């Protein structure tokens, strides 16, 4: 079974490599990038939300071995364990996990990185349109919120609520882009 999933993963990496290195950077590419980054931002926010809100152990287990193993699994699921260890070492801290998966501008699986790519793709798509784009504005608003937020502040204010806000914002961006560019008249 492991061999099957390893081959599947390798196939996905090959497809991603072909897409990244051979497709022209035109309108079709921007729509593909938009969809991929919307999905990535939502997936990472759902993983964080599931761990923090639904898998949250009993209060006395917070910071214990099972809790830390679950946070490591979240990093591994987002392909972020190696990047995390490179930056923070092997000690797992919740605020660092949230920081790298939500706010890191250099980690390709982070929500911030994804929203920045969404903003770029939507801006390029909107440049071919004649009217100002509400989808670009919605992406810009979300990006500004992420750029000005800090992991500790988000955790203290309510990580679950912030994850739901990210998911709702991604849905809004997606719906607006569909209405503006893809809906048949």
Image (tube, helix red, strand yellow):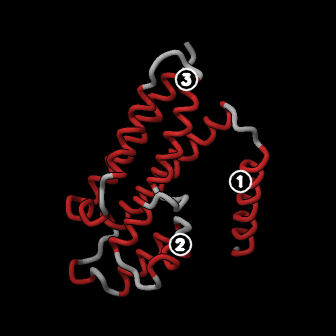
- The residue tagged with tag 2: helix, strand or loop? helix
Task: Give whichever of 62, 148 is nearer the camera.
Answer: 148
Residue occupied by mark 3: 181
**Up-down: is 92 above or below 122?**
below
The label number, if any, that marks residue 83 in the structure image? 2
Give how far across and how far down residue 42 sits, in percent: 45, 50
What residue sits 77% from the left and 51% below the top? 18
Relative to 173, 17 lies left or right? right
Residue occupied by mark 1: 16
What residue sits 28% from the left and 60% below the top? 159
**Up-down: is 13 above or below 67?**
above
Give how far across and how far down residue 47 sits, in percent: 43, 61
**Disc 2 to disc 1, C-alpha distance:** 19 Å
- Residue that lies at the very extreme toward the top in this rendered image: 185
Relative to 19, 151 lies left or right? left
Give how far across and how far down residue 170 sits, in percent: 42, 42
């Amino acid at each position: 079974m492991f061999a099957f999933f390893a081959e599947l993963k390798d196939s996905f990496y090959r497809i991603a490599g072909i897409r990244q290195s051979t497709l022209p950077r035109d309108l079709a590419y921007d729509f593909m990038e938009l969809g991929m980054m919307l999905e990535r931002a939502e997936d990472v926010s759902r993983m964080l939300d599931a761990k923090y809100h639904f898998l949250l152990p009993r209060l006395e287990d917070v910071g214990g071995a099972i809790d830390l193993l679950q946070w490591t699994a979240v990093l591994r699921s987002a392909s972020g364990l190696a990047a995390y260890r490179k930056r923070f070492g092997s000690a797992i801290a919740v605020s660092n996990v949230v920081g790298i998966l939500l706010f890191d501008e250099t980690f390709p699986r982070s929500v911030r990185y994804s929203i920045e790519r969404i903003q770029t793709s939507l801006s390029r798509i909107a440049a071919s349109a004649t009217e100002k784009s509400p989808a670009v504005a919605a992406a810009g608003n979300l990006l500004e919120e992420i750029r000005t937020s800090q992991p500790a502040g988000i955790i203290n204010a309510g990580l679950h609520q912030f994850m739901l806000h990210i998911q709702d914002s991604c849905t809004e961006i997606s719906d607006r882009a569909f209405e503006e560019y893809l809906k048949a008249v």
